[in-house]
Image (cartoon, grey):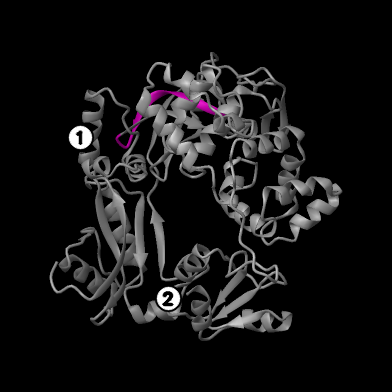
Amino acid sequence: GEDLPEVLEVRGEVMMPIAGFNAMNDDLRTNGEQVFANPRNATAGTLKRLDPAVVASRPLRFMCYEVVRVVGQDMFATHADAMQGAKKWGFAVSKYSALVSDAVGMIKFHDDIESRRDEIEYEMDGVVYKVDSQVLRDLLGSRARTPRWVCAHKFAPREETTKLLDILIQVGRTGRLTPRAVLDPVNIGGVIVQHATLHHAAYISDLDIKLGDQVLVRRAGDVIPQIVGPVLGVRDGSEREFVFPSECPECGGVAKANGEHCFCMNIDCPAQLIRRVQYMVSRVALNIDGIGDKAVVQLHAEGLLNSVEQLFNLDYEAIASLDGWGEKSVAAMRDGIAAALQPKLDKFISSLGIPDIGPETSRVVCAKFNSIGALLSLADNEHEQAVERLSEIEGVGKEVAGSLLQFVSSSKNQAALNAMIGYGLRPQSVVLSEDGHVDGIVSKVFVLTGSLSCSRPEMKAIIEAAGGKVTSTVSKKTDYLVAGDKAGSKLTKAQELGVEVLNEQQVRAMLA
């Protein structure tokens, strides 16, 4: 690019043009490899790949949509000027944009782009409206998660009619039974749709769909297949009611309703085990190299992976004798598992797939209960007392507390955790200072108010990256209020509750 500033920060989106997506799928199909369902999935899947050569070979494109920071040159006064600057510096920017003066112009632009969506070289599900003036953007500020000067206006979803052939039941890692529609393949916006999630029994009942129905299908957000409902006018009497099973389709165990969902109650259900291990090794959990979903299925089928804890005590010699495995692939899996033996405690707890306990909840829980032993000790308390202790943590309600307590109180789960430790697993505890408080800002609860030098979403991301938690309201559980210019009622409430108030410079000093 030309006339580059000393420091430049931009934001944008990685996407895949439709032509490149189709050509890539053709190559994959020719080579006997699995093709991608749509450009969005292809883009996300490619970016998760650890092999840079594969990523570089895919037809990805970065589209800049915001200039965030410029050092060494004057910042742009308007968004339109910023996009021209980004283009001059060599970034791709959207050519589908317009500067309008009122709501009529906004709607006209939306309708025009929607009418041309099939001609545009990449998939889109709507347009974005932004305030052009940087001065007005600064005055409007941001909400807890998003700026006030931007909003999306989605297009009407594409819809087609096809036949509902069957409804299959999938078993998740928590035992949840999720119905999945099997459809006569139909092309919706260039993507062949054959399945749609139906969530639970009440959802099917509310839709009033029957096996054999002609159904209206849309791609919600131009991505997720969704059944809208039956085409009642073409029913001929051959359609059949779907009866939700009273037994798990995988193991035959009793299926029991809990709220609107239904669960397999057999903790030894093979399908649950496979899903739990697949989740544990996945990128969002322990991110173990050398073992993927297919390998988990194969090892279980061969009797070499019969529990979650056995993942850390595999018979590598036996695995090496299986079809598709060799010395290098076995070594890669062994090294990947060895590298995962010292995960952060919150990552490990999250990887266990406990209902309602995701990464964020695991992080705040592990800041208070900073070892496996501390968590297991909850089972020694009276139930109500243990729930009360957990509920004191910001973001942990009684339902979440009950879910965690049920897990750690199970003798089977206790035995599994102890076995993993016996096999060399050593989750790394949160480091505490001498006075018993969490070092730095880990587990501290922040609330933001007033105008800061950056947007609130940016400050929130900075605090959370350092281990803090940002909430939208001031309460007795709030540790710090970060007050910028023109702080409002949150400042008054913080002072009333005795919450420590920091300015932006002070919180940045904490983060340094």
Q: Which structural element holds mark 1?
A: helix
| Residue range corresponding to the magenta coloring | 179-190
Q: Residue at x 62, y 55 (%)?
A: 429
Q: Residue 203 occupies which quadrant of the picture?
A: top right
Q: Residue 57 occupies which quadrant of the picture?
A: top left
Q: Residue at x 26, y 54 (%)?
A: 62
Q: Which structural element holds mark 2?
A: loop
The mark lying in front, picked from 1 and 2, is 2
Q: Residue at x 49, y 37 (%)?
A: 337
Residue kind at label 2, given as amino acid type: Cys
436 horizontally vs 461: left or right: right
Residue 489 seen in the figure = no
Q: Residue 480 occupies which quadrant of the picture?
A: bottom right
Circle 1 sits on which residue? Answer: 23
Determine whether label 1 and label 2 are within 8 Å by CB.
Answer: no
Q: Which mark is residue 454?
A: 2
